[in-house]
Amino acid sequence: MSLSEGYVADVVALIRRKAADEVFDYQILMDALSRYSKPRDAVTRLLLEGSIVRIKKGLYCFGETYRRKPLCREYIANLIYGPSYISLEYAMSYHGLIPERVFTVTSVTCNRSKMFNTPLGPFSYRTLSGGRFAEGQRLITEAGSSFLMASPEKALIDTVWTDRRFSGRRVSEFEPYLFEDLRIERSDLRRLDRDRVQNICDAYGSAKIRNLTAYLRRVWRTEDA
């Protein structure tokens, strides 16, 4: 059976029956189009018409006309490259630690650093070693989609660690860095979970992060006084 103009909606419906969500992989696509003699030609036609969108090789979503709910870029970030979870500037903005809205969805991974420019926007991934990667992530559910994201404490620590412009060799350096460069409010530092900060610091085993933790203790002591 070949794909003709009048069958687009029917073909999309076939994919919908196979796909559990708005995002699906190549195998689901091929299973849905198995009745067609040239399924790859059908995929090309659907892509050209915008009925489906290729996010990256092997990963697709429905086009705007056929979506039942808005796409969750945070959920998609977990799928594009893994294992990974959202952290760094995007997670800092999500948790309200920095005032800027961040367009690129930033994640950490225990694989190689990578950048993906997609029809849904840019997604970047920075490498963290196993112990540093594993500590401090949480599962968040939002509008029916679940995704892994760094806690506020982990997002801050990952950001400090990966910022090569900032040495953090002295505790005194953190005051201008946190308040002027990152534009974090002192009140937001005070609401960080102290035990979680220490656990992440221990997992990092880094002098730079120990200095950050020491500076945060100064902020907390001021609050407790």
Image (spheres, rainbow, N blue to C red):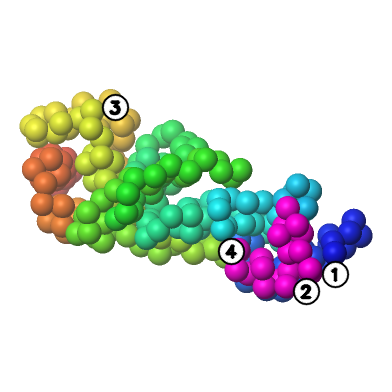
Whole-percent x and y of residue 97? 35, 41
Spatial CA span between label 4 and label 3: 40 Å
Residue extending furthest toward the front: 37
Whole-percent x and y of residue 5? 90, 56
- Is the C-beta separation of discs 1 and 3 under 8 Å? no
- Element type at mark 3: helix
- Element type at mark 2: loop
Quarter of the image for the N terminus: give it: bottom right
Residue 181: mark: 3
Circle 2 residue: 35
Circle 1 residue: 1
Spatial CA span between label 2 and label 3: 57 Å
Q: Foreground residue, 122 or 25? A: 25
Mark closer to the observer (1, 4) = 1
Circle 4 residue: 25
Q: Which residues are magenta?
A: 24-44
Kind of residue at disc 1: Met
